[in-house]
Image (tube, rainbow, N blue to C red):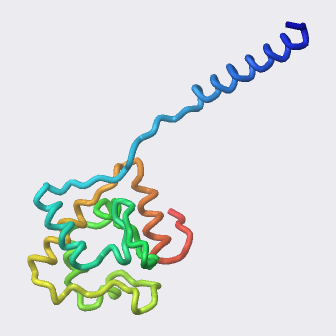
Amino acid sequence: MKSGEKIILAGMAVLVVGLGGYRVITHKPDRGIPYHSTASPELEAQGAALYAKLSCKDCHSLWTERNMLQFVPAPALDGIGSIRSEDWFYHYFSAPNPQAILPSRLKKQYRMPSYAQLPESQRRLLAQYMASLKVDDWYLAQTRKAEYEKLTGKTYHP
């Protein structure tokens, strides 16, 4: 091996070791998926069934799943239970006009429908299910930001 080749090889080795060291020093561990549910298996099954029956995924995403045939810029429901309480959800689902509680910038045909006509047991079940959709504390600010920006169309400034 010629001296010029040795210098180039040594330079490449220093570069590789240096970049590898930099990645080790600057690496941040993956915290995992921040969303989870506190629902019991029974509540999870019943709530998911009602969510499907009411076609909620036509507008909302949950666990990053959404109806790809329809796009409505409604808030994602991942972690929504960390922002709103079960009582809030029950009141919202029971309102004849949900926009009086949470105004929407969406066109009328895409706005949240009233579930006041549903039996009380179903409104309570849906409220319990939504309240069980939590987000880890370290991601809560990002969840609030995303909901605010979807609802208002404005940039979030805490």
| Residue located at (10% from left, 59% from top) | 42
- Foreground residue, 142 or 3? 3
Q: Position of residue 113 (x, y in %)?
A: 30, 87
Q: Position of residue 4 (x, y in %)?
A: 90, 12
Looking at the image, how many numbered discs can be counted on the residues?
A: 0
Q: Position of residue 145 (x, y in %)?
A: 47, 63
Q: Is residue 47 left or right of residue 28?
A: left
The furthest residue to the front: 1
Q: Position of residue 34 (x, y in %)?
A: 37, 50
| Residue located at (35% from left, 61% from top) | 78
Height in image: 62 above or below 105? above
Q: Is residue 149 left or right of residue 49?
A: right
- Foreground residue, 114 or 110? 110
Q: Quadrant of the N terminus?
A: top right
- Foreground residue, 65 or 83? 65
The answer to which image quadrant residue 9 occupies is top right
Height in image: 139 above or below 12? below
The answer to which image quadrant residue 3 occupies is top right
Q: Is residue 4 left or right of residue 156?
A: right
The answer to which image quadrant residue 107 occupies is bottom left
| Residue located at (18% from left, 57% from top) | 39
Height in image: 131 above or below 151? above
| Residue located at (57% from left, 26% from top) | 24
Height in image: 35 above or below 89? above
